[in-house]
Image (spheres, grey):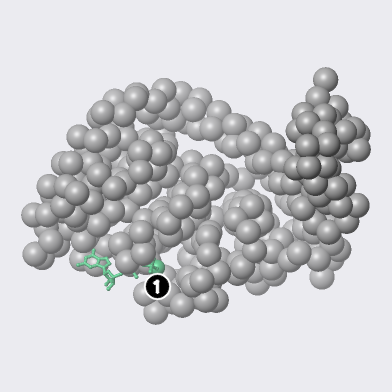
Amino acid sequence: MNITDMGDRILAGDRRALARAITLVESGRADHREQATELLEYLRPCGRQGLRIGLSGTPGVGKSTFIESFGMMLTALGLRVAVLAVDPSSARSGGSILGDKTRMERLSRDPMAFIRPSPSQSHLGGVARRTREAVALCEASGFDIILIETVGVGQSETVVAEMSDLFILLMAPAGGDELQGVKRGIMEIADIILVNKADGDLKPVATRTQADYAGALRLLRKRPQDPEGFPKAMCVSALEENGLQTAWDEMQTLSGWRREQGFFDQRRADQARYWFEEEVRQTLLAQLTAPGPLRDKMQALGTEVAAGETTPSLAAQEMLKTLGLSDG
Ligand SMILES: Nc1nc2c(ncn2[C@@H]2O[C@H](COP(=O)(O)OP(=O)(O)OP(=O)(O)O)[C@@H](O)[C@H]2O)c(=O)[nH]1
Ligand SMILES: [Mg+2]
């Protein structure tokens, strides 16, 4: 299929074309990269925007269950929902969502939904780019909501937050000790904390946990991009489908306010700049570490520095000169 054809089909909402295009952006082959770039450029002027919702939480907290019931609620409202994932580790074999298809059985059969397992392996930087491009493809294809899931085990939350309009943290009901274990940095990027499993025996614990998080959020520095009352913590039950409508209402309130105040577009602009800079950094770094004359030069200079034959600064200057750069 030629690129213009593929682009037109995506714009027309053809799911198979979308799936093929995502495969294209996931490919590492140079000719595929070129085609992917061409395709994304072809689609860019369409200007379609979805709401990008990042979702993170530790293994077992209920992300898949939540996406299934939240996604079903959204499609019932007439919204088209795409689900993508950023999987920080290849440890979970074969992509998380695919193994989860049973948990998202209804959603994966819903014609209003599109579920894409995370691209396997590779470093987080590569996965980040491919996911961003997949987001762009889903938007061009007319999806209203793009859910981007990640397991909360480290850096991947930041990666997902940097490509989301709203960042949702799913938490388990827990005692005070565990609450302390939540990294401050993660709390600081959360827009809404949802304490899941607020049902059955866990309900009282969930309510206390929610109050604890609400208290912790109030202690954080006020962010300009938040209206009164945000970020906030709420209880939900993904299993019993409780609190999902309220959570959606809050997400709309927040994104609506940010749109009106200009923070929504500002955030996307900042994110675009961030990813541009990140890509330059990563590409430079990749050139320095991939086998070749640049890496050889790095190693040779490193050996000289280690042997005391030159200083780190002088060697760095020489390396930058080799790259056609200088530190001024
Ligand atoms: N009681 C209760 N259990 C839930 C709820 N949501 C999920 N669970 C259960 O928690 C377990 C883990 O749920 P998942 O949805 O697979 O969690 P996950 O975050 O996707 O887990 P990973 O994919 O391993 O990171 C399952 O046994 C679910 O049935 C809930 O709202 N209430
Ligand atoms: Mg899961």
Quarter of the image with the C terminus is top right
- The x and y percentages for residue 84 are 52, 61
Q: Where 266 sits versus 26, above or below?
A: above
- The x and y percentages for residue 312 are 76, 33
State the residue at coordinates (54%, 32%): 267
State the residue at coordinates (30%, 62%): 61
Q: Can residue 60 be seen in this view?
A: yes
**76 and 132: which one is in front?**
132
Quadrant hosting ligand 1: bottom left
291 sits left or right of 14 in the view: right
Of all residues, the one furthest to the top in this rendering is 328
Q: Can residue 9 be seen in this view?
A: no
- Which residue is tagged 1? 104
Look at label 1 and name its amino acid: Met
Quarter of the image with the N terminus is bottom right
Where, by quadrant of the figure, is residue 280 drawn? top right
Where, by quadrant of the figure, is residue 256 drawn? top left
Instruction: Say few, some or many: other residues with alpha carbon within 10 Å of mark 1 (under 14 / 14 to 19 / 20 or more).
Output: many
State the residue at coordinates (38%, 47%): 168
Q: Quick one: SS at disc 1?
A: loop
Q: Where 315 sits versus 141, above or below?
A: above
**61 and 163: which one is in front?**
61
Q: Does the residue labelled 1 lie within 8 Å of ligand 2?
A: no
257 sits left or right of 45 in the view: left
- The x and y percentages for residue 4 are 82, 59
- The x and y percentages for residue 292 are 88, 56
State the residue at coordinates (39%, 79%): 102
